Image (spheres, rainbow, N blue to C red):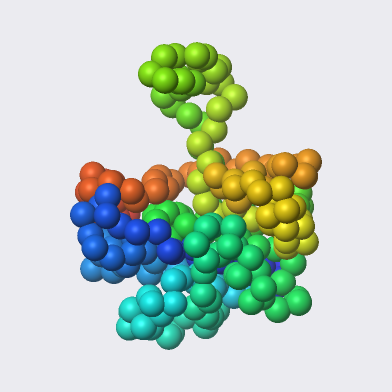
Amino acid sequence: MSDPRSVAALVLGAGRGERLGFDLPKAFVPLAGRTLIEHSIRALAEASCLGRIVPVLAPREFARFEAIGLAGIEALDGPVEGGMERQDSMRAGLASLEDEVEWVAVQDAARCLVAPEDIRSVVAVARDAGAAILAEPVRDTIKLVSDGRVEETPLRAGLWAAQTPQVIRRDWLEEAVEAAERAGRQATDDAQLVEWLGYPVRVVRATAPNPKITRPEDLLLAEALLEQRRHG
């Protein structure tokens, strides 16, 4: 069995929650009696394949995080101070990890419904391939639009919607973050950083809904999904 200590999770939670109607960071928006970041961390801990779970937050939110009461989760560490941009937070999180960590699972706090079995699957594939992301096939037709005009309709058959966690070899990710900084590039997700360097990234299909909580209706959907899971 692979040693969990060689895999660490960085839980990115610096985004604001204004679109959800809350005047606080999105990670601390309540959902069914817990914050979004608490749901995410508990799912990561339940997967039992991660040696460390490190929240990356704005320093002003450290006290709020400590007040949640997650001390019983053995793998939990931090929090670590994030930066203005996602890649700044990634760099800070990577710098906090011990030398024994070989793979990094990047998790958005707002994807708080991720299934532990999907986390285990992505980690297993990444250990074999170097990098893997959780995703699902796109169900809607996608239009490429410029100035309100449709420019192209890509074939839906090959399109997947990326989710988190995204699990990547640590050395690849560190190299990719530094290369992006030198080039002045900002990625829309973490796997894109290593894609730019030509590293292969595998896709693992999600077996359970894993939406990103962004709008008020997302909270309603998440509450319904949690209730459904509780009752089997």
Q: Position of residue 108 (x, y in %)?
A: 47, 57
Q: Is residue 115 left or right of residue 193?
A: left
Q: Position of residue 8 (x, y in %)?
A: 63, 69
Query: Is 4 drawn above or below residue 165 in the view shown?
Result: below
Query: Is 182 drawn above or below residue 42 in the view shown?
Result: above
Q: Residue visible at 40% across and 59% down?
A: 15
Query: Is 221 drawn above or below residue 27 in the view shown?
Result: above
Query: Is 206 drawn above or below residue 177 in the view shown?
Result: above
* Residue 72 visible in rendering: yes
Q: Position of residue 152 (x, y in %)?
A: 52, 14
Q: Is residue 71 left or right of residue 120?
A: left
Viewer-closest of 62 and 106: 62
Viewer-closest of 193 and 34: 193
Q: Residue visible at 24% across and 63% down?
A: 23
Query: Which image quadrant: the N terminus?
Result: bottom right
Q: Determine the residue located farthest toward the bottom in the rendered image.
A: 71
* Residue 132 visible in rendering: no
Q: Is residue 9 left or right of residue 221?
A: right
- Tell how many labels: 0
Q: Residue visible at 23% across and 60% down?
A: 22
Viewer-closest of 183 and 175: 183
Q: Residue visible at 51% across and 46% down?
A: 163
Q: Is residue 164 left or right of residue 213?
A: right
Among the 4 quarters of the image, the one containing residue 197: top right
